[in-house]
Image (spheres, rainbow, N blue to C red):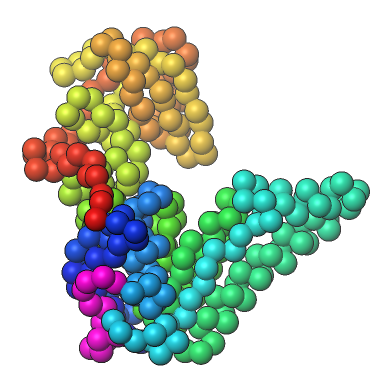
Amino acid sequence: MSGITVIDVTKRFNGFTALQDVSVTIPEGSLTALLGPSGSGKSTLLRVIAGLEEPDAGQVLIGSEDVTERPARARGVGMVFQHYAAFKHMTVYDNVAFGLTIRKRPRAEIKRRVHELLQRQRMALARALAVEPSVLLLDEPFGALDARVRKELRAWLRRLHDEVHVTTIIVTHDQEEAMEVAGQIVVLNDGRIEQVGSPRELYDSPANEFVMSFVGPVNRLGETFVRPHDVEVMLQPDAGSVEAMVERVVHLGFEARVELVRDDGQHLLAQLTQEEAVQLELERGQIVYVRSSRETVFSEAARRPDRRRSG
């Protein structure tokens, strides 16, 4: 088991800069998520760590050893890639059902085949661990699976890591997956690292506008950012409140999400407990009053515009 250190890594593809001066430390025994939108550089960073891509500049250390020039087979890493469904726009269940339904197969058989695919991905993880790698690298291993199966595998991966404690990196574009599985999250955007921290640190203390917007739901009111759970909804006006109209109420188990439009035309999302929603008896078209219990405004330096990347 070893930690990973990436120092000033840059990687270009035909003049396009996929990674720009990236430095990050992955603690020994940790489960770290590389999180970012498509094209952010997260998979490229994983492949550089694995030895599948050679950086144009910078170093990769596994433990205290510089492995930058070492081929993938000599780095002691285990890897699992995304399990692609036959039709990438379909979930695993839909893919299995497509073939079996047109053959008039019973529902029980469809469920059995889905379970087999679930086991197949578990086996891929087990196979990667069987060689006792110093690090385990997972490139969106659950990306093509449906939501229910992904959630089950996430819980299984977390339990597995707690047992074996191998240094693990998982690439994902799914914020919920990263927050649920990882102890440390590295947020990438446009080939650079925006912030490194625990799920709570990223959510409660984002470094800039991008992290605030990408990690968890948020309302933007001009230069002010407000999390939905920091929006108070009242039936009577109070100090600092503004008028708003209820557009929609969505009940989701223990919580309710309220879509509102303020009197200035700005849309707002509020997150309430079911108890609060029941007490307010909210209905579409109802006039209420809202205010924020916490607001975030970033300095000019943290309002980073999109960066154009070229060689």
Q: How many marks?
A: 0
- Outermost residue on the left side: it is 300
The answer to whether residue 71 is visible is yes
- Outermost residue on the right side: it is 104
Q: Quadrant of residue 108?
A: bottom right
Work out whether residue 46 or residue 213 is closer to the camera in this orientation and state it: 46
Looking at the image, residue 19 lies above or below residue 130: above
Q: Magenta stretch containing residue 179, yes or no?
A: no
98 with respect to 165 (left or right)? right
- Residue pictured at 46% horizontal, 65% vertical: 139
10 with respect to 278 (left or right)? left
The answer to whether residue 24 is visible is no
x, y percent for residue 1 = 36, 87
- Residue pictured at 84% horizontal, 48% vertical: 101
Q: Magenta stretch containing residue 63, yes or no?
A: yes
Work out whether residue 180 or residue 8 is closer to the camera in this orientation and state it: 8
Looking at the image, residue 252 lies above or below residue 236: below
x, y percent for residue 235 = 32, 15
- Residue pictured at 25% horizontal, 49% vertical: 309
| Magenta-highlighted residues | 55-67
Looking at the image, residue 276 lies above or below residue 152: above
Quarter of the picture holding the C terminus:
bottom left
x, y percent for residue 140 = 48, 61
